[in-house]
Every structure is written in C-alpha cells, then in structure tokens.
Image (cartoon, rainbow, N blue to C red):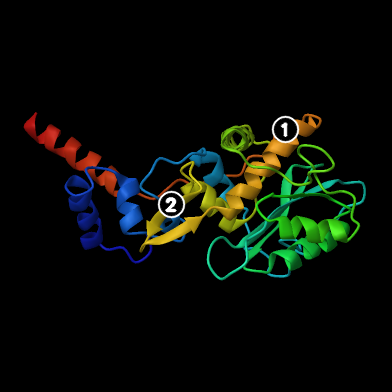
C-alpha cells in the first residue's frame, strides 16, 4: 500500500494475531486503506466479491449532471432499449438519498447513475424527463414514495413500470422479493450478465451484507440506495425474459499487493523451517 512502512506491516500482523483473530475484513473495517475499505462492514458480504472487484478497473465516478452518462460516449444509441430504476427518498433531511441507475437492456451495461437528496415529487418529474432522453426508457420507481410515482404519472408518460397491474404503478418491495432480487443480482454478477460501471455502486455492493440498514462507521447508518436500484433492475430483467446475451468481456484483475495475512503465513512457514 502506498506510504506503508515496515512498522505499519508489523502493526497489522500483531493486530490480526490478537484483537482481530486473523479476520482481515474486521481489521480493514477499523483501519480502512482506501475508499472501498471504508464501506466494509464486519458482516459477511451478500454479493460475490471477485466479479465486483474485477469491474472496479473500468468504473467511473457518477456524473453529477442528473442521469447523464458516465462518459461523453454514454449517450442514447439508436435501436437500443433502456431501463431506468429510481429509488426515491422521502421528505426531510435524514434517511436515504434518492438514487437511480440507467441500464442499456441491449448490452446489459450500466450507462449512468446518480444519487442525492431531492424533493420526491421533483425527482419523479425529472425521472420522466430522463426516461424520454434515454429513448423513452422503461421507468421503474420503487413504491416507497407515492409522491414520486404520482408526479411521474401526472406528466402523461406511459412507459412507467407496473409490477402488479396498470392501476398500481411502481415496484413493490417485499421481504420475499428482496431475497429473490438479491439472488438475481448475485447471479447476474457471477455469470457476467450485468456490467456495473459506477464506482460508488460497486463500493456499496462490496459492503452489502443482505440487510437494508446497518450501523457501520462512527455510528452512521448506511442506506443501500444504489444496491436497491440494482436489485430491482435484475428482478425486472429476469421477469422480462430478455434474450440471452453473450458473456460480457472479462476485465483484467491486477494481482493484489502483499497483505498482512501473507506475512503471517510467511512467518509461520519460517518458524516451521527453523524447527526442522
């Protein structure tokens, strides 16, 4: 790790050997080395770590221009269909931020993502504007905010997703479909059928432990707003029975640096050699 000296390595060795009982995830939770480590919880992750880490190399910061693409090349493509999943916040200054992701259904690649605190009615109206921009995308709004859904409907936009029937627009999250949609997300990542390109989205998924709310850092509750959008997207794509896509190209994974656990193994090996 840049800036690490021998003293830091020995601190990790001693801490892992005593306080953290060899658990590197708990050590990184207390002493993060990068922005991803800062998201780690002390619980077991619910999503496959290896494909998420492989996607990090090609990830981008979110475009702060509402719902526009990660790069200048991420624009609506003729003949391509898009899905926008929006998770609105409630009113007030606390709780989840509003979040959205834009998925190109023709390539299964995320092309835009955004999150911030915003009035839910305004958010619903802006999501419709965004859907029109992305080739009249299918717009799925999580049902936790009637204000956002109502505002979207009042624009007259007709491509609003209804999970139950046309009189109940929106995606309704239940305990059962939260579990099944998390499984769909894990399968899509594992089988390389979904290309997530948002850095913040990947950070959330790497830390996600299967719960929606968890106290993780300095007593602050972390809300998995971006994970919610990915879960819903995978549930909808699964139910749409989209044509099978070829496996997305692999991303080269750089070999990780030497870790404290490696140092522990080496020290144990050296001790055993000395005894023989």
- Any mark on residue 214, and which? 2
Q: Position of residue 164 (x, y in %)?
A: 77, 37
Compared across the picture, whether 171 is left or right of 128 comes to left
Q: Quadrant of the C terminus?
A: top left
Nearer to us of marks 1 and 2 is 2
How many numbered callouts? Answer: 2
Residue occupying image coordinates x 19% and y 36%: 269
Q: Quick one: 248 or 62, which is closer to the camera?
A: 62
Q: Position of residue 151 (x, y in %)?
A: 80, 61
Per the model, the C-alpha gap separating discs 1 and 2 is: 28 Å
Q: Which residue is mark 1?
A: 238
Compared across the picture, whether 244 is left or right of 274 comes to right
- Classify 10 Å Cα crowding around label 1: few (below 14), some (14-19), many (20 and above): some
Q: Position of residue 199 (x, y in %)?
A: 58, 57
Q: Quick one: 179 or 156, which is closer to the camera?
A: 156
Residue 248 in view here: no
Q: Earlier in the sequence, mark 1 or mark 2?
A: 2
Q: Quadrant of residue 171?
A: top right
């Amino acid at each position: 790790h840049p800036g690490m000296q021998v003293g830091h390595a020995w601190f990790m060795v001693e801490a892992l050997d005593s306080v953290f009982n060899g658990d590197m995830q708990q050590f990184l939770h207390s002493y993060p080395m990068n922005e991803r480590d800062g998201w780690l919880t002390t619980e077991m992750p619910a999503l496959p770590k290896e494909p998420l880490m492989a996607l990090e190399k090609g990830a981008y910061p979110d475009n702060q221009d509402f719902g526009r693409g990660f790069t200048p090349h991420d624009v609506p493509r003729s003949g391509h269909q898009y899905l926008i999943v929006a998770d609105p916040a409630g009113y007030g200054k606390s709780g989840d931020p509003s979040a959205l992701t834009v998925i190109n259904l023709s390539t299964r690649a995320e092309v835009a993502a955004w999150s911030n605190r915003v009035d839910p009615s305004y958010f619903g109206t802006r999501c419709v504007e965004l859907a029109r921009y992305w080739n009249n995308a299918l717009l799925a709004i999580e049902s936790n905010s009637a204000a956002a859904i109502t505002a979207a409907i009042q624009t007259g936009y007709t491509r609003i997703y209804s999970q139950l029937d046309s009189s109940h627009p929106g995606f309704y999250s239940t305990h059962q479909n939260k579990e099944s949609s998390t499984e769909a997300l894990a399968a899509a990542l594992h089988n390389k059928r979904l290309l997530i390109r948002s850095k913040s989205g990947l950070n959330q998924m790497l830390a996600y432990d299967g719960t929606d709310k968890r106290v993780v850092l300095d007593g602050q509750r972390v809300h998995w707003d971006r994970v919610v959008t990915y879960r819903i997207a995978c549930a909808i794509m699964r139910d749409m029975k989209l044509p099978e896509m070829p496996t997305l190209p692999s991303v080269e994974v750089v070999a990780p640096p030497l870790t404290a656990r490696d140092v522990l193994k080496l020290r144990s090996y050296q001790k055993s050699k000395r005894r023989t």
